[in-house]
Amino acid sequence: MVISLQPLEGVRVLDMATVVAGPGAARHLADFGADVIKIERPGGDSTRNLGWRTDPDDDSLYWKIVNRGKRCVSLDLKDGNDREYFLDLVRDSDVLVENMRPGRLEKLGLAPSVLHGINPRLVILRVTGFGQDGPYSQRPGFATNAEALSGLAGLLGEPEGAPLLPPIALTDEVTALVGAFAVVMGLRKVQLTGAGDVIDISLLESMLQLMGPLPSAFVHLGYLQPRLGSGIPYSVPRGTYRCRDGVWIALSSSAESVAQRILTVCGLEGDARFANFQSRSENRTALEEAVTKWISERDSAEVVAQLESADAAISYVHDMKAVVNDPHIQFRGSLVDVDGITMQGPVARFSSGNSDIRWPGPSLPEHGTRVTWNERKIDNDPQRIVKE
């Protein structure tokens, strides 16, 4: 009978990146069937010690999540034997992920031209803070820099307050998704042309994509978006609001029909100041004050019930305890248990159900100092992929 394969079954990935963004891209590939071998420096990747642990003698939760589904080996690429073994892996790889500062791979004698001389079909994903060239390319590339330089930090915070940085690894996680997407495009190009490629992605440009029309609005209109707290210019009311019982809710009116329903519930229908997008934007302060007052005079259960009954976009503001216990998240299985570790499930779902988290990030000696590639299970004719 024909068996269902994971989308990236048979794809071989070498992950020599560190921390979150590069390994995160390889993690997404592993989630959907790629055979990923992670190359660590002797002594192990620093992410093993990043953040929380369930056991002081165990690896960090971050390690277990970012490197799930991978097999790990420790190699010193300056050592001749380790280098030869690494190049043997390259010969049979489809993808290489690295995040060294530009030029470091070349100094190791592993420039893309060298790697393509060994394996011309190799897709090389290079993840850096600022890209492979340009005035900032040699700077240390951390998410903080990308969040500041992309304009994101300047938008976060209250109007008269300081610019803020996200309290999570936002840039790394976004760049990981960009990297996985880019690799799949690179693999498609190999299918079409037979030739590999070098893909240059950066934390900064990944975050710049999130700015939407703001660069265009400045160039063409001279518009500079101010800090608006939880607000955005084109959606009023929109933000987080505290109810009488101290519970916070989040409300959005990004569609005109939703905005009108919210105005009706709050007793503001018919007010000419709030009749359309333009007038609501011009009277932002008055509208936000009116909605804030209406919500603050009621308990959260009443606020949510009334606005949900009007089919408005409203949600409680969750902490992680509420996230873990949310009935929708539980119903969807958005969080999964992998060998006793709770973590997010794969980022996408296929109707065939063909995605899988095989194991959490392995312990340092688990796969030894040498591994071999898994047998490829794909074929140009899917009807020949059969299970006896």
Image (cartoon, rainbow, N blue to C red):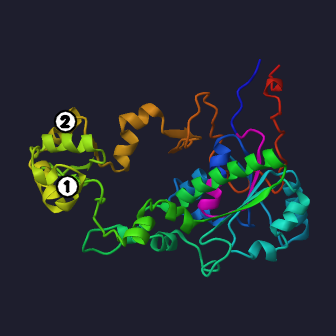
Vertical comparison of 128 with 88: above or below: below
Give the farthest residue toward the bottom: 135
Residue under the image location 81 percent in, 57 percent down = 369
The residue located at (58%, 73%) in the rendering is 141
Question: Residue 184: x and y, percent?
Answer: 69, 48
**Tag 1: amino acid:** Arg
Of the residues tagged 1 and 2, which is closer to the observer? Answer: 1
Q: Which mark is residue 305?
A: 2
* N-terminal label among 1 and 2: 1
Asked if one can make out residue 51 in the rendered structure from this viewpoint, the answer is: no
Above or below: residue 5 compared with residue 258: above
Image height of 264 relative to 282, above or below: above
For residue 280, the mark is: 1
Query: Looking at this view, is 59 or 361 the one in front?
Result: 361
Q: Which residue is painted at 20% across and 32% down in the image?
A: 309
* Residue 17 located within the stretch drawn in magenta: yes
Residue 19 shown in magenta: yes
Q: Marks 1 and 2, Cα distance to the nearest angstrom?
A: 24 Å
* Percent of width and height locating residue 325: 37, 39
Q: Image quarter for residue 310? A: top left
Relative to 192, is 85 on the left or the right?
right
67 left or right, relative to 368: left
Q: Which mark is residue 374?
A: none
Q: Position of residue 297 (x, y in %)?
A: 8, 49
- Tell which of 55 and 32 is nearer to you: 32
- Front residue (pair 356, 271): 271
Name the kind of residue labelled 2 in the image: Ala
The stretch of residues the image draws in magenta is 8-25
x then y, percent, for residue 304: 21, 40
